[in-house]
Image (spheres, coloured by chain):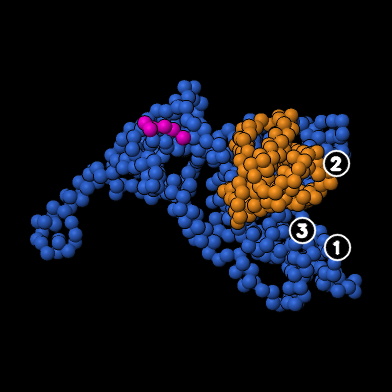
Chain colours: A orange, B blue
Amino acid sequence: MRVEYINPFVEAAFNILKEVVDSDIKRGELYLKSTSQPVLGVAAIVGLAGDVEGRVLFDMSEVTALAIAGQMNGEELSSFDDLAKATITELANMITAQAVTKLHELGFTFDLTPPAIFTGENMEITDAGVEALIVPIELSQGRMEINVAVRER
Amino acid sequence: MSSELIGLNDIDLLADTDEESKDKADVIDYKMVTFSLGGKDYGIDIMKVKEISKASKFTYVPNSIPFVKGVYNLRGDIISVIDLRLMFNLPVPENKTAVENMIILRLEDNTIGVIVDTIDKVVGINSEKIQPPHPLFGDINIKFIKGIVENKEKLYIILDVESIFDQKSAENAIQQKSYSREAMPLAEQAAEKKPESEGGVDYSFIVETLAAFSHFTVSPVNDGWVRNRFNSWSKQRTENGLNAQLQSAAEAGEFLNSFGSPYSGHFWEEDYSTAVSEIIPDVDGGTYSAWDIGCGKGEEAYSTAVCLKKKFSSKKIKLYANDSDLLNISTAPNLIFSRNSIPAMYDDWVTEGSNGWHFISDIKDLILFEYHDVTHDNQLAPVDLIVARDFLSYLSVNDQQKLIEIFYDKLKPGGILIAGSNEVVVGSGWEALNKGRVPAYKKI
């Protein structure tokens, strides 16, 4: 993955999560992965097109997703309902949008697709021929992995 | 007519067969649609061609590979459209009208459109005149070529479209090719060359400690150097009254300190840059692409870029530089250095900024730095040059073998691989070009 793309995604994730979810957040070591990757339970996906093509995946367990959605709404949520889904979708949107804005300032033009959310057990995702950058983030609500797979067109 | 029949019949019949075989060469039993790509003539079996058409306004499909032009609505059927020129890395002529010549192929399991430069005509030939492709055949991978045929003083390369677009058979072809080329895998070679005489136990201990302390894998790639080094090392250590075995990472580093190639982690001096430049052959075409693996903080990538820029001043140069160390590669695009750390030969290409000296954008724009682990897949198009100095030795034996295969696949025919000064690329299909300190290998 092109070096210039890495920081905007990491910074955007850090800034937004710190602002809207949890002020005490920690970033894990970044690494690369190319094989099929298991998805924890809830995955929000945002597609990218333009100078690059690819997608950003926000991956967390359902418990974590529920806690994050609850925190963002300021109320306790008991089931992963439409409100919770819409909240996670919005979070994915905010982070990706900020990253893309930062990249735009550096001169790279991207377009976003509306986020889609997947839930279920035992899911995995495979991107043929693209390796993914994994940004693990530790929140007090649990662990979230931001999985960025983009390549030059 | 079978020989058995001739045996049973009389002489008259035998005379007939002679004439028949003469006629045979003129019997037309194979028709192909001919077209040109990058100035050369190609043919496709007419039985595979549904129709030809002119088309424009393909619908772009996000996330597709670069040579997929998009999809096209052919009277209600949606077909995928592939640009053959991009697929085979041939030059794409400028097309002002945006209307492309398209051949619609009917394959076993799908219908597909391919874009070519110009479509010529239908040529009928005798299938016996088709000759097998020569292994040295230039632009298009040999596994995609069915054969070559002459007609009216023109040579046509017949493409095997089923194998080009059939994913399964393409994968099989790659596998078969690698089996035949690599008669004996590296792992077996390594196992066979178990150290025996020269202080057997000590040597295998060194091999193990190098792996543990420095992630350095002794294999046929560097075996020769390690043996020599071990001999001088144990002699020197014995003279100083020390144990020849490596006790710490520092000692392993000391053992390996003469392994590195010249100017590893520094900018290349003029002598080395010239030596590299001399070993690289001239190529046709307006572009030159290179791949630098393990570029670290970027010194090697910038040195390579300047070397190529000097050699091919009029060509468009593209250098892909990868490293799997995030910290190192992050600093590479905006590498800052002090004035005296850079040799005088780079004077024309550097400038002073507010933080220190850096390369001018003419050079920076040639290089694309990527955070990438080369043992993973990538979509890099074939390149003319691969620079992987002191890189293979730090991978496992299996990864070394895999990487040499990847290098072979990613190089254009006649492309050059530059390895570390003390590394040997094993495997057939490579021609060693040893010129002094730059061990280079040419893909044949």
Q: Which residues are magenta?
A: B71-76
User: Amino acid type of disc 3?
Assistant: Phe
The location of residue B324, given as percent across then percent down, is: 72, 50
Please state which amino acid type lies under the numbered disc 2: Ser
Query: Nearer the N terminus, badge 3 or badge 2?
Result: 3
Residue at point 75%, 46% (across, down): A76
In what element is the residue under mark 2? Answer: helix
Residue topped by disc 1: B250
Q: Are marks 3 and 2 in contact (CB under 8 Å)?
A: no
Q: Residue at x 60, y 44 (%)?
A: B380
Q: Earlier in the sequence, mark 1 or mark 3?
A: 1
Q: Is residue B287 left or right of residue B373?
A: left
Q: In the visual, does B1 lie left or right of B185?
A: left
Element under disc 1:
helix
Q: Gap between marks 3 and 2, in whole Å?
A: 22 Å
Residue located beneath label 2 in the image? B341
Quarter of the picture containing the C terminus of chain A is top right
Is residue B407 toward the left or the right of residue B140 in the image?
A: right
Q: Percent x, y for residue A72?
A: 75, 40
Tell me if residue B419 is in the magenta stretch: no
Crowdedness near tag 2: few (<14), some (14–19) or many (≥20) residues, C-alpha within 10 Å: few
- Nearer to us in this view, B122 or A6: A6
Q: On the rendered structure, is B112 left or right of A32? A: left
* Chain ID at mark 2: B
- The answer to which quarter of the image holds residue B280 is top right
How crowded is the residue under tag 3: few (<14 C-alpha within 10 Å), some, or many (20+)?
A: some
Same-chain check, marks 1 and 3:
yes
